[in-house]
Image (cartoon, rainbow, N blue to C red):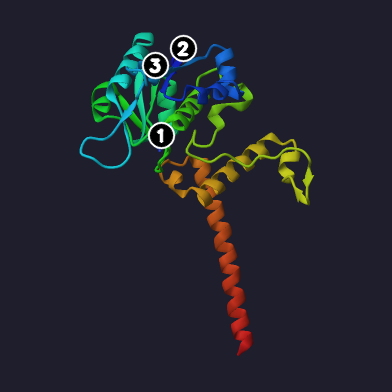
């Protein structure tokens, strides 16, 4: 991870969308702690003419509009002048899919210039000559790259050392070890008839840690088996899973004994 401040510059035709994003929660704290600096550049400010037009009809016909290259190029140049060491990223459904490992990669950089497309997309010559990396936040189409830029900034910022307190360590997160996080509970001890698991009240830290690892594994197995396939289990985790296998076998065995008993009883 880089020491020093990470610099985010967002290029958008809707800079006001970011005002409340910067003003709350961990992002605000990261700015106050001087871990990140954030700014927006309004692409429209770089458009020529009285109407400051940023889009135009596509060559070859068809529906929708395309973002014009000149204002985008000028806005990207201005951003690079402000932060020359930054990676230039275009938010687009055609990019590589953003995940925790990309977030980690970005958190280690000195700066990101995030270009938010609108309409049907941006002129291809911008992608070819002014962009280092294309990022999609998932296989669906948004009305613009702004919400995607917020996702990227959020996920990267919380991984910058010193942004989260020790208690909220990013190391324990879902995905940091390709395992989903364990279940969480807080007061009250009984909520609408549902109890907090006994072990969490025991004060036995070793048992609590074991229970947390077990629930992590079970959740990942039940909800996101695909994550498990992408990681190697350590010895302890294999032991836990073998124990489930034995428990399951025991139950199946007891069932088959029971059903053969009832079959012989039927005769
Ligand atoms: N712009 C439109 N859809 C997007 C997506 N899925 N990811 C990033 N930027 C986008």
Label ID, residue 3: 2
**Screen quadrant of the C terminus:** bottom right
Between marks 2 and 3, how big is the CA–CA gap?
33 Å
Label 1 packing within 10 angstroms: few (<14), some (14-19), many (20+): some
Tag 2 and tag 3, C-beta contact below 8 Å: no
Q: Under 8 Å from ligand 1: the CB of mark 2?
A: no
Query: Residue 97 versus residue 214: which sits nearer the camera?
Result: 97
- The residue beneath circle 1 is 98
Looking at the image, is mark 1 or mark 3 earlier in the sequence? 3
Label 2 packing within 10 angstroms: few (<14), some (14-19), many (20+): few
Query: Residue 224 versus residue 249: which sits nearer the camera?
Result: 224
Q: Residue at x 38, y 9 (%)?
A: 82
- Mark 1 vs mark 3, foreground winner is 3
Query: Residue 177 versus residue 265: which sits nearer the camera?
Result: 177
Q: Under 8 Å from ligand 1: the CB of mark 1?
A: yes
Instruction: State the image quarter where residue 255 is shown.
Output: bottom right
Label ID, residue 45: 3
- Mark 2 vs mark 1, foreground winner is 1
Looking at the image, is mark 2 or mark 1 earlier in the sequence? 2
Q: Residue at x 51, y 40 (%)?
A: 179
Could you tell me which secondary element the residue under label 1 belongs to? loop
Spot occupied by residue 250 in the image (x, y as percentages of width and height): 58, 63
Q: Residue at x 72, y 46 (%)?
A: 197
Instruction: State the image quarter where residue 144 is shown.
Output: top left
């Amino acid at each position: 991870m880089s020491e020093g401040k990470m610099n985010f510059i967002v290029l958008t035709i809707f800079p006001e969308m970011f005002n409340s994003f910067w003003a709350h929660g961990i992002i605000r704290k990261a700015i106050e702690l001087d871990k990140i600096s954030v700014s927006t550049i309004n692409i429209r400010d770089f458009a020529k003419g009285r109407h400051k037009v940023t889009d135009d009809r596509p060559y070859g016909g068809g529906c929708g509009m395309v973002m014009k290259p000149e204002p985008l190029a000028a806005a990207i140049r201005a951003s690079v002048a402000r932060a020359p060491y930054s990676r230039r990223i275009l938010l687009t459904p055609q990019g590589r899919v953003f995940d925790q490992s990309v977030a980690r990669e970005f958190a280690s950089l000195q700066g990101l210039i995030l270009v938010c497309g609108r309409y049907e997309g941006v002129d291809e010559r911008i992608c070819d000559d002014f962009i280092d990396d294309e990022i999609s936040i998932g296989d669906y189409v948004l009305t613009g790259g702004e919400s995607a830029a917020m996702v990227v900034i959020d996920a990267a910022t919380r991984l910058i050392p010193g942004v989260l307190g020790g208690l909220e360590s990013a190391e324990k997160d879902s995905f940091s070890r390709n395992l989903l996080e364990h279940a969480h509970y807080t007061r009250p001890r009984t909520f609408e008839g549902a109890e907090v698991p006994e072990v969490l009240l025991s004060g036995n830290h070793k048992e609590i840690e074991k229970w947390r690892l077990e629930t992590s594994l079970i959740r990942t197995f039940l909800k996101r088996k695909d994550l498990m396939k992408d990681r190697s289990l350590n010895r302890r985790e294999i032991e836990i899973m073998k124990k489930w296998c034995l428990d399951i076998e025991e139950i199946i065995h007891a069932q088959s004994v029971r059903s053969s008993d009832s079959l012989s009883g039927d005769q």
